[in-house]
Image (cartoon, rainbow, N blue to C red):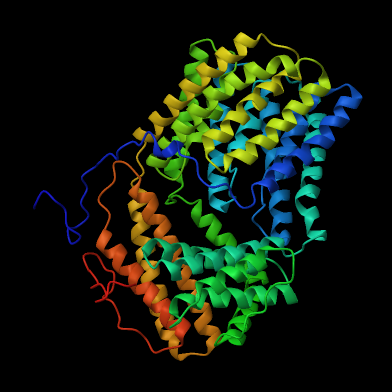
Amino acid sequence: MSDTPSDASPRPRRPFIRGLPLVAPLRLGRPSDTWFKPALSVVAASAVPHLTLLALGRLDLVMYTMAGSFCALYGHGLPYARRARTVAGVVLSMAAGLAAAMVTASLTHSTAVLVAVGALLAAAQKVACDAVRIGPPGPVILTFVSSAALFAPQRLDQVPAHLALTLAAGAVAWLVCVGPALIRREGPERRAVARALEAAADRVAEPGPRTRHTAAAAVHAAWQCLLASGRPTPVRRSLERLVVHAEAAGACAHPDPDRLRAWAALTRARGPVPEPPPAPGTAAELYGIDAERAALRASGGRRAARRTLLRSLGPGSHLLPVAARTLIGCALAGYLCAALGVGRPYWAIVTAASLYQANTTLTWNRTLQRTVGNLLGVLVFAAVLPLSRTGPLALVLCCLFFSFAAEALITRNYWLGSVAVTPMALLVLEFGGAHPAGELVGDRVLDTVLGALAGFLAAALVTNRRAAGRVERALEAAAQARTEAERALGHPHAERAQARRALTARLVELREAADIAAGEWWQRALPEQRLLAAERAGHRTLAATAQRQGPPVRAPETRRGAVAPAPANGAA
């Protein structure tokens, strides 16, 4: 066998380590188009209980209300029907984790037991959030609250009252998240469709693998948002027609990116949704969407969704290695800090838990971002501490300001948001009484460094060989979906549209699996040529279904070692 593994080689197994970037993870990006929504929501959800406790003179209970207020950070990309269920689920999950932590803290003061429970809760929260794809901020907020509660003084008879405060604040957060539906019911759907139109315009203007995948992912996200939005309305019907145009843009003979961008701007604005001219097969597409929506709402569709979720948590799940990393890394960080006499080992647990991303390379990026952000954040805390100690109202206002700043900055880069998160987390301790500034700063710096080192060490040593297996399964699923889409070319429009959406979902999943595996250490070489062939063949089939043409020339099946020839002009 040659030293360089080829695509036809049977499962090359040479482990390798990716290079670790130092500058790229710290570069600032463009802010999210909806950065102000979670920022304003968390301020509104926190202000009500904060000011109520201030009026009652019980700011020492802020930690329990903040647990519920933080739930307002979730679900802002979801349509309101699903957002209501999602945020309610987050509130209940937050209460469950907090209850487990408070009961444990009331029954034992053993640091060894508390760290072990904190690590177990962090791993469970990580797996649950990844399984349901909850989106940012993910499990970090849940872990922060439960870990802090583990090391807070607690009596068993106080648990029900403290839990009631969390649920009450969670109810306020739910109202804040769902309330905008009274003003702009289809707001999330409009933003999702606008992103799909913009991505389609970019694909038309600059054809290539990157824009092609981005457009497919944006169109898929728009369809998913519309499917989850509830019963169709005139506005949603117009949005569905716009997605049909975005989906067909890559297959049009003379697509117009400027028109797509103009539609996107009008869709994102507050005025009427643009009414595009009918695209071929639009009526059948909408019929297919209605049938798919009905299937999802039926009991059989809900059972299928539950089975899919349970499979993602089963013994062969690709989430288990990340859960093992989280458990080991958080436990190692907590025990290391406890051994060194640090009074708040939960900071180290939260630092380690916040690092774990989809693969080792992304985990390194987050490690660098978290460390830089926290170290700068303690300097900001030291500067603002005298102001916060001028009175209780000043302390409340400082916390609200940093809550807003964290969400406003974090979409630019995680480290920039951490600069605001760190002083906010430290100021929370001030609600229970003043602490020496030097002690708080010193403990936080030490916990950050130790938590980052222990967390990344666990990520580097706990291998994830299942990432490559996930790529193999995604290749097979994409090949099957492409075959079904090609067969549907001779079927009615509705079946063809449904097959196309299924193929789009498989191609998005394939790219996600490949990107995760590409950044994983100690991994066998990826079948790059098979991936390229599968993606090109899949996108050619998508174009054919959008054009309502006959089946394209079939690429060779993506069995191991097979390579599909690229098109003569190099286009997908």
In this orientation, which residue lies closer to the viewer: 16 or 176? 176
Image coords of residue 5 (percent x, y): 16, 53
In this orientation, which residue lies closer to the viewer: 478 or 286? 286
Residue at the (48%, 51%) spot, across then down: 314
How many circles with numbers are drawn on the protein?
0
556 shown above or below 522: below
In this orientation, which residue lies closer to the viewer: 282 or 202? 202
Q: Is residue 12 left or right of residue 301?
A: left
| Farthest residue, direction front | 258
Residue at the (68%, 46%) spot, across then down: 36
Quarter of the figure that contains the C terminus: bottom left
Asked which quadrant contains residue 196, the reply is bottom right
Residue at the (41%, 82%) spot, across then down: 544
| Farthest residue, direction right | 56
107 shown above or below 313: above
Image coords of residue 425 (percent x, y): 65, 26
Asked which quadrant contains residue 535, the reply is bottom left
Q: Is residue 307 left or right of residue 316?
A: right
Image coords of residue 363 (percent x, y): 43, 38
In this orientation, which residue lies closer to the viewer: 199 or 18? 199
- Look at the image and tell me whether residue 106 can be seen: no
Q: Is residue 102 left or right of residue 334?
A: right
| Farthest residue, direction left | 1
Asked which quadrant contains residue 358, the reply is top left
Residue at the (28%, 74%) spot, across then down: 557
209 shown above or below 368: below
Image coords of residue 304 (percent x, y): 57, 66
Q: Is residue 257 left or right of residue 11?
A: right
- Look at the image and tell me whether residue 132 can be seen: yes
